[in-house]
Every structure is written in C-alpha cells, then in structure tokens.
Image (tube, grey):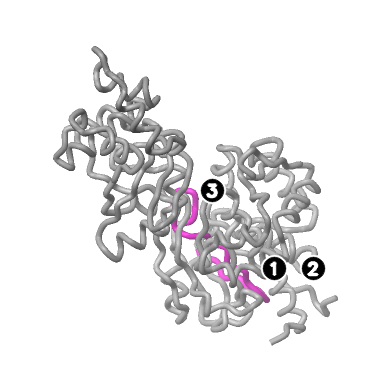
Amino acid sequence: MFPTRPNIAIIGAGPAGLMAAEVLAEGGVSVTVYDAMPSVARKFLMAGRGGLNLTHSEELSAFLQRYRDAAPWLAPAIQAFSPQQLRDWCEALGQPTFVGSSGRVFPVAMKASPLLRAWLRRLDAQGVRIELRYRWTGWDDQGRLIFDTPNGPRAIAADATVLALGGASWPRLGSDGGWVPILAAKGIAITPLRPANCGFTVCWSDLFRDRFEGQPLKGIALSFGGRSVRGEAVVTRDGIEGGAVYALSAELREAIALNGEAVLHVALRPDLETPDLIRRLSAPRGKQSFSNVLRKALQLSPVAIGLLQEVAKTLGQSLSSLPPDRLAALINAVPIKSTGTAGLARAISSAGGIARDELDADYMLRRLPGVFAAGEMLDWEAPTGGYLLQASFATGVAAGKGALSWLRGDRQL
C-alpha cells in the first residue's frame, strides 16, 4: 500500500488517541502512541467508576443537537462512527453493551477496565507501540517531535502526527492543557479553555453549608435561560453540582461571563402543579411544626426544606409566614444565585480548544500539514450522557482516516 511503511506518532493515550492509533494500524502504517503519564487512558478509567456511559441511544438527529453550535462541524465524524458503530466495536472486543432506563449506553461489565484491556490487546496485536512518561514539548528546527522522557530529551521524526491531548479538566489524570502555548506559538488559534459539566459557586450561609454539604436534592427540576432539566443536584461546600446542573452548565457559564452572575431556579416538587401545592399547604397544620408540614404534606427532604429556609432569609422573608400561594410559587422556583464556576481542574470536561477554522475536513491543522488533532482538545463541548466519549471516539476515527488519506495522497481538497 505504501512504498515504505510510514511512521505515525499519536500524542495522547486517551480514547481519541487510541482510536486514531487503531485506524492507522489497520491502514498498514507503523504507529507509536506517546503519553506523559505512567499508564494509559487514566481519565477514561475514572469515568468508568460510575458505570462508563459510552454513548446514548437516542435518535441521531436529536443526539447531534447535544453539541449545540458545534453540531454541524462534528456531525460528519459522528455519522461516520455512530453510537451504534461504537456499540458494535465494543461487542467485537468481547464487551457487549446495554441501554439503561435513561437511554444511556453502558458496557454490561459496567466498568472501563475490561474494555480497555481488550482494546490494548488488540492494539498490541496490530503492532501499535505505546511509550509512557513521554511528555511532548513541541518541535525542533528540523520538524521532529521533542519529548521529555525519563532518560532525557528525545527527538522523534514522524511522517504524520495525531494530537489527542485532551482539554484541561482533571489535570492530575494527564489532560493539563500544556499543549496550548505550543500550538499558539505556531499561530494556531485557541479558544480559551473553560469549565464544562461543572459545578457553580453559591454563597451559602455557614449554617446551611455545615449542615447540608454533600446532601443530594433528588427528583428536582432546574431551569435557566428557557431550559428545564429533570434530575439531581448536590449541595457542595461552595455551591452546587450534579447531573442536572451539568446539563445547564454552558448556559450558566456564559451568563456569568456576561453579567457576573446567573440565577438558577429549582423546582423541588416539579411533579406537583401549583393548585395541588396550594391545596396541600392550605390544610390545617394543627400542632405540627412548619418543617413537619413541608416534610409530610409535600415529602420534602431536610436539605430541600433547608434550601427553602436559606433562600427565604436572603430574600428577607419568613418562610412560615408566607401565604400558601406564594410559598407554592417559591417551592417550584427556588432562586439560587451563582457568581462563578467551581473551577476547571474539577470540571468533568472543558470547553474551548483548537478553533474549528484551524482544521480542515480531515481534522488536519491547516497551518501544520501532516499534523491532525482529535478529542477534547478541539473547540466543542457536550453534556454528560455519553456525548463526550462518543465525540472523542468519533473524532479519533476521523483524524486517523484523515492521516491515512494524507499519507496516501488521495485527499479531496
């Protein structure tokens, strides 16, 4: 297929990098994967602790809309390596999947480690080499890749390179954004890296924080910017986080950047209509305490009642003195004001990255011929639910195919 077998360097041993390595190895080239960490796919393994949500089973057009303004850009890659194809790929590795009640897709093993072990065995059989503790620091004046290694600096020539270095969330697992100044120095436009699927800061009172830190708010609905999301949230020492919060994190983050704050509304009993709430709150209380009324009549948890009391204080109101109609309105629209994100290092993922215009349709950097990029280091974001991993796998496939086309000289420009 090639007059001489090309040598390809993949930098980053997460899902995108390993998938690009598999595509390239199948294409008949020599592949070496380099990673700065002592072991591969550390963030992937951490994601697997919660069951490894690989992708989602919803109809593809709805699936693509989860990527917001990046949907048209990512669509060709995800259509070419779809959620069903990802499931088939897992099956071929001996790791069947199933669809959960929420539509999310998980491996039957409910862990990342069996899938990763099977994948690494396949890559090894394909001849893919993996070099660990190789931290990429850029290129030398001859265009060779430079790495800091346990044995000192190394310069490595590659016929093509795929960058799959991740974003900047959970840097202790390897994705620390260290590639940003390297590419910026080459004139590559980088959209600033920002937290995504993250928590938000709230100025709780000491009393509320000390009593309810770590407590979940279950069966709620969160609303912001015209969107409403059912799910759960967790009170943290400095604010609020959880799946329902993550689903609105892009809108909340952007509002805070623009206005300095954002007010999220929490429906504590979204399944109850306002007239039903008023009826229950209007019933005679007898000798019950106000908290007991809320607990028994509305099945509110202690943390939900505490949240109501916390917000009432900030509004200068006495919760127990509110008439039923106003109390009902508050229960299903509890305002929580945030003035910041919980920070990039603890975010599940990051937004921002290599600007879309810097890449051609094959995921090659226009300014750096022969250098391709994939995964979370690109400028897109998605909610949790399988969308993050799906796009990482799919762009890894796309970058691998793009590199093969470039090496063969059969790219359509």
- Amino acid type indicated by mark 2: Gly
Q: Which residue is mark 2?
A: 27
Depth check: 97 or 68 in front?
68
Tell me the quarter of the picture where residue 399 sits: bottom right
In the rendering, at what x and y percent does residue 265 appear?
A: 34, 47
Locate the N terminus by quadrant: bottom right
Q: Is residue 99 left or right of residue 391?
A: right
Q: Which residue is mark 1?
A: 400
* Labels 1 and 2 touching (C-beta < 8 A): yes
Q: Residue furthest bottom?
A: 413
- Amino acid type indicated by mark 3: Lys
State the residue at coordinates (54%, 62%). Answer: 67
* Labels 1 and 3 touching (C-beta < 8 A): no
Q: Residue furthest left?
A: 316
Marks 1 and 2, the one that precedes in the sequence: 2
Marks 1 and 3, the one that precedes in the sequence: 3
Query: Which region is colored magenta?
Result: 152-175
Depth check: 234 or 50 in front?
234
In the rendering, at what x and y percent does residue 304 appear?
A: 34, 31
Q: Residues within 10 Å of mark 3 (few under 14, many from 20)?
A: some
State the residue at coordinates (54%, 42%). Answer: 46
Please, what secondary structure does the residue beneath circle 3 have?
Answer: helix
Q: Residues within 10 Å of mark 1 (few under 14, many from 20)?
A: many
In the rendering, at what x and y percent does residue 173 appear?
A: 49, 49
* Labels 2 and 3 touching (C-beta < 8 A): no
Instruction: Name the disc covering residue 43, or none.
Output: 3
In the rendering, at what x and y percent does residue 407 appear?
A: 73, 79
Marks 2 and 3, the one that precedes in the sequence: 2
- Amino acid type indicated by mark 1: Gly
* Residues at marks 1 and 3, CA–CA distance in whole angstroms: 21 Å
Tell me the quarter of the picture where residue 117 sits: top right
Locate the C terminus by quadrant: bottom right
